[in-house]
Amino acid sequence: MEKVARSVAFSSNKGGVLKTSLAVNVAGALATNGKKTLMIDMDNQGNVATSFGKDPDDIEFTIYDLLTNNPEIKSVQDAVINVSPNLDIIVANDDMAYFEIDVLTDKGNYPNYFNLLKNVIKKFERDYDFIVLDTPPAMGLIAANIFDAVQDVVIPFQPEQYAFRSLVKTVDAITKFRESNSDLKIIDVVPTKVRNTNLHRAFLDAAKNYCKTQQIPFSKLEIRDTVKYGEMTARLSIPITMMDDLSKTLEPYKSVYDDLVHELGYLD
Ligand SMILES: Nc1ncnc2c1ncn2[C@@H]1O[C@H](COP(=O)(O)OP(=O)(O)O)[C@@H](O)[C@H]1O
Ligand SMILES: [Mg+2]
């Protein structure tokens, strides 16, 4: 049988919960371990480009151009940027902020406006082992396109007020999409920015219990809250999972992401 890429989206309707950090580090770890990986940014903030040291506004063609079939694109490869031997990225920029309004005001041109991403992924899925998607913190047309296109969803859970409600809402939304995409499943809920406080423990326990009742895997790992990581990544132009020879103090920030990729079942 011909190989088809496994696709995974990091999704939550909340911002700042480490969607981008998880997505770029998982993509980086997969590529470092020899898996041919395509990373697609669906968020107008363009943080995938910046995570690889690129300015999203300097890039000619983005995911927006592929989704909307920009006639200036001669080949889908025009939007692909190679960043390391096994890793390609398709970036997003501010254009994606207008995607929903542009598509919904021109439905004649986009009769299947839920399937635009699926059609883009089809053009790449035989060339990669994995397609990793970073997503915006919203549940609109972009999320609908993502849930119609991917197999796996990973939900970062930052144990703060309202996070539980957001988790339930995200799970409910994904459950509805299973009617049109039977491959879709939540493969992990990952605690992020965790502090050792009673409040954080209580929020985590509530989320864990809820996931149990829904038969959704809840990660054994947690990404600890640390200013160090934010400061460090701001200076780096590659994800930490692509760096070697890290100091002893930095190594744990990398190994938790490597462990996550194993937990997801993506590496033996
Ligand atoms: N372990 C961590 N603890 C605290 N802050 C972190 C950690 N890892 C990353 N950050 C910072 O948190 C911010 C939000 O992360 P990001 O991955 O962009 O979230 P999202 O994509 O969900 O908006 C970024 O500035 C990032 O550098
Ligand atoms: Mg992000």
Image (cartoon, rainbow, N blue to C red):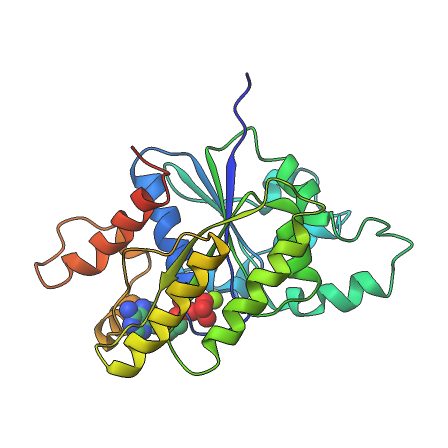
Relative placement, left or right, of 101 versus 253 is right
Whether residue 245 is visible, yes or no, is: yes
The answer to which image quadrant residue 105 occupies is bottom right
The image shows residue 78 at horizontal and vertical percentages of 61, 43
The image shows residue 127 at horizontal and vertical percentages of 53, 30
Whether residue 19 is visible, yes or no, is: no
Q: Quick one: quadrant of the N terminus?
A: top right
Is 139 in front, or is 29? 139
The answer to which image quadrant residue 44 occupies is bottom right
The image shows residue 210 at horizontal and vertical percentages of 45, 64
> Residue sitting at 14 percent across and 55 percent down?
246
> Residue sitting at 29 percent across and 32 percent down?
268
Is 231 in front, or is 171? 171
The answer to which image quadrant residue 13 occupies is bottom right
> Residue sitting at 78 percent across and 47 percent down?
71
Q: Is residue 234 above or below residue 186?
A: below
Q: Is residue 85 above or below residue 206?
A: above
Q: Residue furthest front?
A: 213
Q: Residue furthest top?
A: 1
Q: Is residue 92 above or below residue 164?
A: above
Is 12 in front, or is 243? 12
Relative placement, left or right, of 137 versus 225 is right
Relative placement, left or right, of 177 versus 166 is right
The image shows residue 45 at horizontal and vertical percentages of 53, 69
Point out the quarter of the image occupied by ligand 1.
Answer: bottom left
Q: Residue furthest right?
A: 108
